Image (cartoon, grey):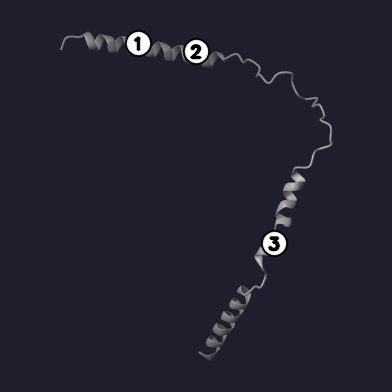
């Protein structure tokens, strides 16, 4: 029991010693250290622009031709939709 109490007191003392830092956070965030990165980002750039040889003259994508399978599927879907509309129209006019 005495060893357990000694270990508990020692670990508590080490924990509290680690938390007691005397560093002042206000010195790290002074105006001189905060504004330095901003000033360097606003400095003018002296490098000349360089042309990209892989660039194209236009940004428009090349036109693509739809695949035959996609066209056939679209045609089949249109035919089914037409049949469904016809069946719905017949159902509305039918006597009840």
| Residue at image coords 63%, 15% | 63
Return the disc, 3 or 1, that comes first in the chain's sequence.
3
Q: Nearer the viewer, mark 3 or mark 1?
A: 3
| Res. 43 image quadrant | top right
Which residue is under mark 2? Answer: 72
> x, y percentage for residue 44?
80, 39
> x, y percentage for residue 27?
69, 64
Query: Of residues 85 and 56, which is closer to you in this image?
Result: 56
In the displayed structure, does residue 32 sit left or right of residue 17?
right
Which residue is under mark 3? Answer: 28
Picture layout, residue 6 above or below residue 75:
below
| Res. 85 image quadrant | top left
SS under mark 3:
helix
| Residue at image coords 70%, 54% | 34
> x, y percentage for residue 66?
57, 15
| Residue at image coords 66%, 73% | 22
Which residue is under mark 1? Answer: 83
> x, y percentage for residue 84?
33, 13
């Amino acid at each position: 029991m005495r060893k357990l109490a000694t270990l508990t007191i020692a670990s508590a003392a080490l924990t509290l010693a680690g938390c007691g830092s005397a560093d002042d956070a206000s010195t790290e965030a002074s105006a001189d250290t905060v504004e330095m990165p901003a000033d360097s980002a606003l400095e003018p750039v002296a490098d000349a622009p360089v042309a990209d040889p892989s660039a194209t003259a236009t940004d428009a994508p090349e036109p693509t031709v739809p695949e035959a399978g996609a066209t056939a599927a679209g045609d089949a879907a249109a035919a089914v939709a037409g049949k469904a509309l016809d069946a719905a129209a017949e159902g509305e006019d039918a006597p009840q």
